[in-house]
Image (tube, helix red, strand yellow):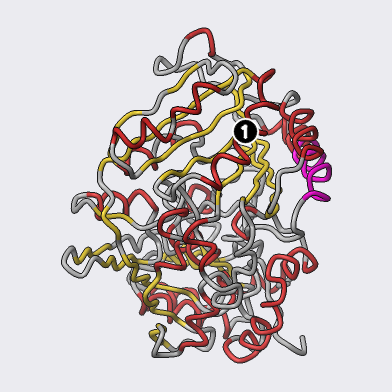
Amino acid sequence: MTSRAEVESVRATPDVARLRGALRGPVLTPEDPSYDETRKLYNAMINKRPAVIARCRDPADVITAVGFGREQNLDIAVRGGGHNGGGLGSVDNGLMIDLSLMRGIRIDPKARTADVAGGCQLGDLDHAAGAFGLATPGGIVSTTGVGGLTLGGGLGHLTRKYGLSIDNLLSVDVVLPDGSFVVADADQNPDLFWAVRGGGGNFGIVTNFRFRLHPVGTVLAGPTFWPLDQAEEVLSWYREFLPNAPEELNGFFGFLTVPPLSVFPEALHLQKVAAVVWCSLASPAETERLLAPVHRVGRPGMHGVGPMPYPALNSMLDGLYPPGHQWYWRADFVREISDAAIGEHLRHAEALPTPQSTMHLYPIDGAASRVGAQDTPWAYRDAKWAEVIVGVDPDPRNAHRLRDWTVGYWEALHPHSMGGAYVNFMMDEGQERVQATYGKNYPRLATLKRRFDPTNLLHINQNIRPVGK
């Protein structure tokens, strides 16, 4: 960790002026008027103050910034779209390499590919690909960064049909920790390509992602809400129904508080409910047939499935989760939802601490399960769900309350889990959790880390330590 005296020397050194002259993008230090606004994180529970922020506009800027951080012996954090729950896109007293100005996208509708710059958000990709009736799997909130989402795996509404984001990644452009620039795909630098498909930002800074796209235009989507006193029946039904449904149908389960919006029945406003948010790629008639059992489970308070453009579905929750709220996360992979687990879910759902706090179970069976457990770093291909528990609220005074509820819920459910978690749903939870998340793939990742980043320059992340460190 860089000391305060060392930071002061970095601020005073002519090298900062040299960095400013070498980058196309702006370089900020704490004296700059826009510094405080720029350094803000999506999760306002985390407040970090980098010594230097390099706002890169292209790969050349990234190469220069990496060299500066290495030469100045600064801790380096990389921020893409900016959602990182654990705040690992920033660092106290170090260098933030900010990719958020790199927002270019190129769609090839004939080849069905998308080239996506490292600072793009999911909404950028949805907008660009959606114009051609195309999409690739990933995310449920359009302000999510494509880079962090993908490097951690990438799951969302299309996962059962088309797999994870990493399963649709064709190549990456990478600035390595030594400052060199490489392309990695199945033929060029295949070990690096393997590592970045789930290994996070440990191996380099990805400046471009090339994805395979799929025909996805209008989908049949929306939520079904049930009163919370019917949650046991609903979750018991859901755990059997969804894994046996055709892969064209996706639905994530959640406990939530219904927002007081006109699209929802007024009687449900601010009521705690059990919910499934559906996304169907099937025809309207087939979707109606597939979802017919929904109406025979309990007494739904609302069934709001209808046609909408896929980008609209991916931005549906944006207004509920703007930047700057307090967030606390916990997560696990789940193979089975046991009766005992359902009991714990119900107990903690009744105690949802704030209107935005929630628990989601995202399906990861179907196409995602047909990729081998060692074909990518994502080690839990036999999981059925990625479970996430989040305490959320705009008021900093509720931070401890959010944390206590989230951790208590997770501790009650963790014994019913597979041991590891989706890396994008984790806080900074230490090496034991990182190793549990990568399981049998961790030794290979640690070996490749030694090859591509032997000094662990890129360690402000869910860190994979080089073998021998």
In this rendering, position of residue 3 left or right of residue 263: right
Residue 227 point in image, percent of width and height: 62, 17
Relative height, residue 335 to residue 338 (above, below): below
Please name the residue that numbered disc 1 is placed on: 237
Q: Residue sitting at 66 percent across and 61 percent down?
A: 92
Residue 135 horizontal/vertical position (percent)? 31, 55
Magenta-tinted stretch? 404-416
**What residue sits 48% from the left and 52% below the top?**
38
- By secondary structure, the bulk of the magenta-drawn segment is best described as helix
Using the image as rendered, state which of residue 380 and residue 324 is in the foreground. 380
Magenta span includes 405:
yes
In this orientation, which residue lies closer to the viewer: 254 or 33?
Answer: 254
Residue 463's spot in the image, x, y percent? 68, 71
Q: Residue at x 71, y 76 (%)?
A: 440
Residue 332 placement, left or right of 296: right
Left or right placement of residue 253 versus residue 81 in this view: right
Q: Can residue 11 be seen from the camera position used here?
A: no
Instruction: Give the secondary structure at mark 1.
Output: helix
Q: Is residue 119 above or below residue 447?
A: above
Residue 355 placement (x, y as % from top left): 61, 24
From where the camera sits, is residue 116 visible?
A: yes
Of the 4 image quadrants, the one containing the C terminus is bottom right
Q: Residue furthest left?
A: 110
Q: Is residue 437 magenta?
A: no
Q: Residue at x 39, y 54 (%)?
A: 121
Q: Where 396 falls versus 210 (above or below)?
A: above
> In the figure, is residue 381 to the left or right of 163?
right
Hey, which quadrant is residue 442 in on the image? bottom right
Callout 1 amino acid = Trp
State which quadrant residue 351 falls in.
top right
Quarter of the figure that contains the N terminus: bottom right
Q: Residues within 10 Å of mark 1 (few under 14, many from 20)?
A: some
